[in-house]
Image: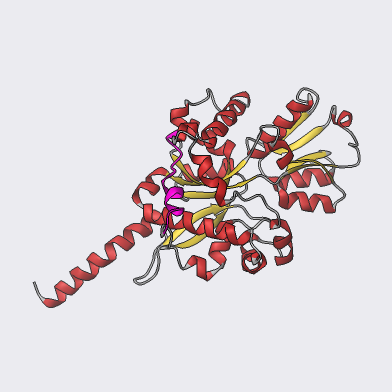
């Protein structure tokens, strides 16, 4: 073999892993030699800075990933899971437990690899509702099939209002907010970003997600990755989990504004609004992370995630979004604790 042919063969061998990873990371994305391959990842825009936006906007965090994040905005977890199944991207940051569990029950092979947050939503009402009795006969806007829907219906059940109100399902929170502002609904259950906006329009918050969680209806924001991608690129998923963990620690630390400010452009809001919207957001602390994945006996089936997913599946059955509650073993099979466990080991993260 000539020296020129040997050089061409060597270059081809060196580029093959990069090109293979690029093909797996993004639909049609390419990377030139020496560049990181692109990883498409879904996220939610709004006033709350998620860890994925902080990673993408802060070079010291982004540099620790073997890929370049290309964030793809989605309006709802239900739509996001559908797009993931269709191959639009291999992962979602901040997806709720109802869309995730519905996906699992309907055959979408995702792996839950990190529990990012609890919910910070709330039920906002206008001045036509001054007491619980005033809810009777009202329409309440909610994101259909979402964590918000799950929480709202749980609260209505505890209040004995299930059969006295009409929960109107919307496909996006922006549509809910628009319906509230136009007077089509007089109450809306929305996440923190929209909650702040509706409060500016005279809305009053009557109950928060944190209060509803204490009643047994906890809603979660999850980091999920398509199973085959996780199996083919564990080093990418591990790095992503590590940097999500690091980003959330920054978001809850004294230097939060420093990391939120550059992420505001990705979120589509002003830095001041992003800082205000993220302040106090209930990200799951490091001390609680492992407890979600495994229970006291060290198994995933006894962990808080499986318990939460079982309750969520029961809700989805009542909404005709699942035919039956999956077995705990089937739910546990879609929860992968290995990335979180390694992230908490000495030298487990770069």
Relative image position of residue 116 (x, y in whole percent):
57, 49
Q: Residue 248, relative to residue 143: is it above or below?
A: below
* Residue occupying the point 75% across, 25% down: 162
Q: Is residue 45 above or below residue 8?
A: above
- Residue that sits furthest to the bottom in the current view: 3
Q: Position of residue 87 (x, y in %)?
A: 44, 47
Percent x, y of residue 301: 46, 31
Direction from residue 207 to residue 282 in the image, left or right: left
Residue 324: say if magenta: no
Coloration of the structure image? secondary structure
Q: Which residues are magenta?
A: 332-346
**Which residue sits at x=49%, y=35%?**
296
The residue nearer to you, when weighing 346 against 157, is 346
Residue 228 appears in the rendering: yes
* Residue nearer the viewer, 242 or 204: 242
Q: Residue furthest left?
A: 1
Q: Nearer the viewer, residue 270 or 120?
A: 120
Q: Looking at the rendering, which quadrant does residue 11 occupy?
A: bottom left
Q: Position of residue 215 (x, y in %)?
A: 70, 32
User: Is 42 on the left-hand or right-hand side of 198?
Assistant: left
Q: Residue 20 appears in which quarter of the rendering?
A: bottom left
Where does the C terminus fall, quadrant-wise? bottom left
């Amino acid at each position: 073999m000539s020296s020129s042919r040997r050089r061409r063969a060597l270059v081809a061998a060196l580029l093959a892993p990069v090109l293979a990873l690029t093909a797996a990371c993004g639909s049609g994305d390419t990377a030139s030699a020496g560049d990181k391959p692109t990883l498409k990842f879904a996220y939610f825009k709004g006033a709350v800075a998620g860890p994925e936006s902080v990673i993408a906007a802060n070079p010291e965090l982004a540099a620790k990933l073997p890929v370049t994040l290309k964030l793809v905005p989605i309006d709802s977890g239900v739509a996001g899971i559908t797009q993931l199944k269709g191959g639009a991207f291999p992962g979602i940051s901040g997806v709720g437990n109802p869309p995730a569990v519905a996906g699992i029950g309907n055959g979408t092979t995702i792996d839950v690899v990190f529990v990012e947050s609890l919910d910070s939503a709330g039920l906002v009402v206008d001045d036509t509702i001054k007491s619980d009795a005033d809810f009777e006969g009202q329409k309440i806007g909610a994101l259909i099939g979402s964590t918000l829907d799950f929480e709202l219906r749980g609260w209505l059940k505890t209040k004995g209002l299930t059969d006295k109100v009409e929960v109107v399902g919307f496909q996006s929170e922006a549509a809910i907010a628009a319906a509230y502002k136009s007077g089509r609904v007089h109450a809306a259950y929305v996440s923190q970003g929209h909650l702040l906006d509706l409060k500016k329009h005279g809305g009053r918050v009557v109950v928060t997600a944190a209060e509803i969680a204490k009643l047994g209806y906890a809603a979660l924001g999850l980091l999920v990755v398509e199973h085959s991608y996780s199996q083919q690129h564990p080093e990418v998923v591990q790095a992503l989990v590590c940097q999500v963990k690091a980003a959330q620690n920054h978001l809850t630390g004294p230097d939060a504004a420093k990391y939120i400010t550059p992420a505001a452009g990705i979120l589509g809001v002003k830095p001041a609004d992003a800082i205000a919207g993220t302040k106090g957001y209930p990200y799951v602390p490091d001390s609680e992370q492992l407890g979600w994945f495994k229970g006291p006996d060290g198994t995933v089936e006894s962990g808080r995630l499986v318990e939460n997913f079982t309750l969520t599946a029961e809700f989805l059955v009542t909404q005709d979004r699942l035919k039956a509650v999956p077995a705990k073993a089937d739910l546990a099979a879609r929860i992968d604790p290995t990335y979180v466990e390694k992230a908490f080991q000495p030298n487990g993260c770069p």
